[in-house]
Image (cartoon, helix red, strand yellow):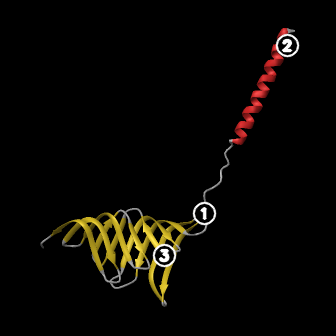
Amino acid sequence: MIKKKYFGILFIFLAITTLILLSYYKEQGLTIQPSYQTSSMQDLHLTHRENDKIKWELLAKEATFSKGEKEIFLKSLGLKINQAPEINLISGNGIYETEKGNINLIESVEINIKNTKFITNTLKWDSKSELLTTEDNVKFSGKNFLIEGTGLAASIKQQKIRILKNVKATFYLS
């Protein structure tokens, strides 16, 4: 009889404890909601026109559109700036800001202009002011020279490129 009483009390105690724990964790329960919904596409080709003239073209192997479509995340992309001379940029990843028209290249960027090549880690294309900028290390090379430094400011309208700091130049005599 005593065993039955202790067993009954123990059962009631465990039941109450279980109910308390369940109600506590129910209040603390996690609900998983995505931070944003996405859609994606392969082989994106986007052109930016002004006065019926294509100013620049953006190509990407893969594009992921965020909710609200304010940013497009790009993989394996190329940016072609149509002017004389033509400027081609290649990068592993980037972000296109749809409202501003800016493009941030964020992985291993290569810029090709005629027979010269710039290499840097990140680069920003400001579409409205037509500026290319970075604060990263830059290598600028051609057939007979290598120029290295930190930071880059390139005005496409004025056709001026400037390496900002720690400039070191090597020229090769043929």
Q: Residue at x 62, y 61 (%)?
A: 37
Along the polypeptide, which appears first: circle 2 or circle 3? 2
Q: Which residue is mark 1?
A: 38
In the picture, the quarter occupied by the C terminus is bottom left
Q: Which residue is mark 2?
A: 4
Depth order, front residue of 60/161: 161
Disc 2 is placed on an element classified as helix
Disc 1 is placed on an element classified as loop
Depth order, front residue of 136/86: 136
Q: Which residue is mark 3?
A: 101
Amino acid type, label 2: Lys
Check disc 3: other Cα within 10 Å, few if <14, some if 14-19, many if 20+.
some
Depth order, front residue of 48/76: 48
Q: Quadrant of residue 14?
A: top right
Residue 68: which numbered mark, if any? Answer: none
Q: Residue at x 53, y 74 (%)?
A: 99
Check disc 2: other Cα within 10 Å, few if <14, some if 14-19, many if 20+.
few
